Image: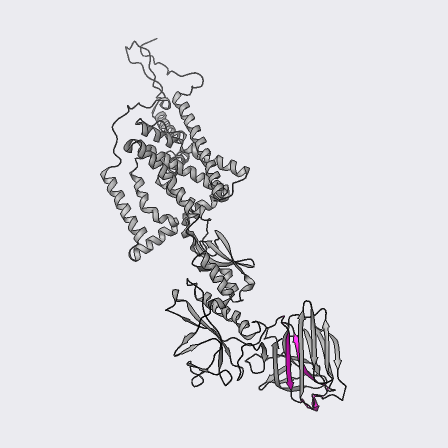
Amino acid sequence: MSGSARVKPLVASGPARPTAAAAGSARVTALVAAGFALVAGAGIGLAAIAGFGAAPGGVGAVLTLAVASGLGWAAAPLVRAAHAAARGTAPPTVGPAESATRADSVTRAERAGPAGSAEKPEGATGPATSTPDLAERAPAKVPRSHRRPSLASPVRTAVVAGAVVLLGLVCWLHPGEPGRVLFGLARATVGLVVYALPLVPLLALVPTGPRTPVAWVALWRDRKALALGLSAARLVRDAVLGRAAGLVLATVAVLHLLRGRPGLEDSAYQLAGGLLGIVTATPLSGLLSPAGAFGVLVAVVASVATVTAGRLYRPLGRYPALAVLVLLVLAPLGAGGVSNRVGYRHFLGADGDRVVVIAGLSPHHRHETYDAGVGLADLPGPLHPVLRKGFPVADRDDGARVAAALADPAKAATDGFPDGGLTLRTGECFSFVGGTSNFRYTVPCNGEHTGEVFYVGRLPFARDPGAEVRTAAARGACEKAYGGYLGAPYGTSYLPIEPPVVRRDEAAPHRRDLVACLFAALGPWPLKGTRTVATLQQPLDWSPGPGCAVEAGLRFTAAQPAQVCVAPGRAVTAAGTAPIVIDAEFQPVGRGAGSGRVGVACVGADAASGYYATVGGDGVLTLVKRQGSAQASLGAAGKARSSPSPQTAVTQVQLTCRPEGTGVQVVASAGKGREITLTDAQGITTISPRLVVESVEAPVTAAVTLFTARVV
């Protein structure tokens, strides 16, 4: 062979054997992945035992462990690097994610020339040499150093201290309007973790080792999007599994998860993990179940804690590093566990037909509910809408107390209601100075008066629930006290309630509002215990149906032939199942009314179906049951042409309707010799009183001089 001949490069035949370092790296990766799966499994068990969430099913558990193992595989290079830093040796090759950068380096070397061949110099007698492959080049060994490195440079320490002070001002003191705005933004982003943000910069003092730059050049020069993606993924991996960002992210997600994953309603997310918690914990728990998500987050926390402790081993020593490891694991998990049990607001709300005290972040976010010992039916109607929405109370005991007081206003009754120079007391009557002023003065109830006080008490709220709830509670207290004072339950009587008078009592504990409930006067007599359902004097919408009319002084007209008119009409909806007795008196209607009839009726809520007791032009009392368009005669009493006729005489009619189960006992009377008594087994049991005028062949106008109805 001539001296100028070139020696071919040495090429190994057959597959290359894995080196001992690669085999050790694979073992470490497998151990880390198994450790992640074990930690995630322990997290699932902890969540199930502590009640954080139900354990996932078989498929969910397998998926959770698979996700945890994948995170362990990704975190293995960081764990190996942290272990090497703790031992004071050079970190080994950090795994498959870095292969893209190496491959890119090899590609550039190949373009530069055949790096695997060497040219034998002229006159050289030794064998030709070859350059080892770049991928097989072993890392240089660095001897251990027994000198303890410093934790951070003075510059880094100063920057961290400044960040801690700045975040402390914003998150703990939030001075001025800028501080409040920044605090609001931070709280919306990370929720309650905002109060721990000033401590996060301290993790920047932890040595992090060299950073591998992102291969941006691979995208625009070599057009290797895969290399760029792998580099970006490596940065995300480093941040989530080995740095402070991962600890903050996991803490936010754990907090949001353990506080019930609230959404955007009522800004409840700010009392959990904020917007960051919504976008992390919510989809993760949806994929893996709440317990599975908790297990994965525990593995992330353990990864960051392990890597951080490894990097602090040499600067701080064994036991301080171990303390950091324990602290970084227990702090977020302990904070999440405590937040799962405490720190909730309390609301009074409704669950089905029960009143409940809600422990949660908002009325619609329910962590736990407690029965308040009161049924929704026990509370007046005005309170039902506000209970469906929920309103704040101080705590669980306060919620039960408020519910009991709303169900029984007598528990919150008080002696008097200061009103200018007057103190309004239950059972007293009053008038206004000059008749139109707002200054009231007390007068005897058996004389002329304007109104009557039937309840004085305090609203039971220790915490202000808002104007809507206060108004509903005042109205509800008046409706509940109504029946106890009048003797006829609210809703069965036509007697209206005046708007409650509410006033803040500054001298009372918690400045609880005083409320006074009033009746408008119906005459020179007190209303207490009268069981009044209807009277002629009460302010009422007497409007009857089409073709019927009511004039001033209560002149009641059926203007069309063959027409039945009742007053009041559908505008009055009060009805009940309590037995009532109705008395009415009509002036003569005149002979021009022909066979027209006058009387009273017990009708249902439709102001049509019910029992009609009327006296006709022949003087006969008839009792008729109407139901829809159907009509059935139930009886008649009196002698035709011999009994007093409403055309020429004053007509008095009395009707008693007494619901009993599904039947109704009916007693009608129009004077001596005209009485009807019967029981309708399939009766109309929800009733209210009405006046009746019925025309036959000619219009009828009747002047009403008496109309009363009361509960018997």
Classify residue 488 by image quadrant. bottom right
What residue span does the magenta drawing correspond to?
A: 576-605
Name the residue at 39% across, 45% down.
Answer: 335
Q: Give percent across and percent down for residue 417.
A: 43, 74
Q: Is residue 590 left or right of residue 363?
A: right
Residue 276, horizontal then vertical, whole percent = 41, 47
Q: Nearer the viewer, residue 236 or 339?
A: 339
Check residue 577 for magenta coloring: yes
**Is residue 238 something that shows in the picture?**
no
In percent of the image, x 48 and y 57: which residue is there? 357
Where is residue 184? Give x, y as percent.
35, 54
* Placement of 648 over or under 694, stated as above or below: below
Q: Position of residue 23 (x, y in %)?
A: 42, 23
Question: Which one is nearer the viewer's eye here, 328 or 207?
Answer: 328
Relative to residue 639, is residue 454 depicted above or below? above
Quarter the N terminus occupies: top left
The image's colouring method is one colour
Q: Is residue 85 left or right of residue 28?
A: left
Q: Nearer the viewer, residue 103 or 670?
A: 670
Q: Is 317 colored magenta in this rendering?
A: no
Q: Residue at x 33, y 15 (%)?
A: 129
Q: Is residue 516 visible?
A: yes
Q: How many marks?
A: 0
Q: In which quadrant is the C terminus drawn? A: bottom right
